[in-house]
Amino acid sequence: MTYVYLLRSESHPDQTYIGFTRDLRARFAAHNAGLSRHTAKHRPWRLVTYCGFSEAKRAIGFESYLKSHSGIAFARKRLW
């Protein structure tokens, strides 16, 4: 499985992060440990939602969509 996930910063609630991974638990722990330069300064993170995909190609496509203008609007309305 490949997962697309949405994080929200607990220290800066206006900051969100969208990503994908095969190991959700390890990736989430890495974000909160400061091992990702894109998310280190807004720690700690809370997992808002995640979706599992059997095909990595579909997960990557969904992640790209969520990062688009219309995808952000969709996520705010339906996923956050």
Image (cartoon, rainbow, N blue to C red):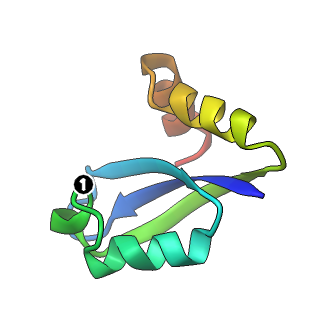
Q: Where is mark 1, residue-wise?
A: 38
Which residue lies at the image location 59% right of the left edge and 45% below the top edge? 79
Please state the horizontal and vertical placement of residue 18, each as a whole percent of the image: 45, 47
Residue at the extreme top = 70
Location of residue 69 with respect to 79 vertically, above or below: above
Name the spot of residue 74 as percent of width and height, x first.
Answer: 56, 29
Q: Amino acid at mark 1?
A: His
User: Looking at this rendering, what residue extends furthest in the left direction?
Assistant: 41
**Crowd tier of the residue under label 1, counting other residues whose Cα lies within 10 Å: few below 14, some 14–19, many 20 or above:** few
Residue at coordinates 20% horizontally, 64% vertically from top-left? 42
| Position of the N terminus by quadrant | bottom right
Q: Is residue 64 above or below residue 46?
A: above
- Residue located 21% across and 60% down the image: 37
Q: Nearer the viewer, residue 38 or 50?
A: 38
Q: Residue furthest right?
A: 54
19 left or right of 3? left
Residue 46: name its quadrant.
bottom left
Vertically, is 71 above or below 50?
above
Secondary structure category for the residue under label 1: loop
Q: How many marks?
A: 1
Q: Nearer the viewer, residue 35 or 17?
A: 35
Classify residue 35 as left or right of residue 77. Answer: left
Residue at 27% x, 51% y is 15
x and y percentages locating residue 65 in the rendered image: 56, 26
Q: Residue 25: x and y, percent?
A: 58, 77
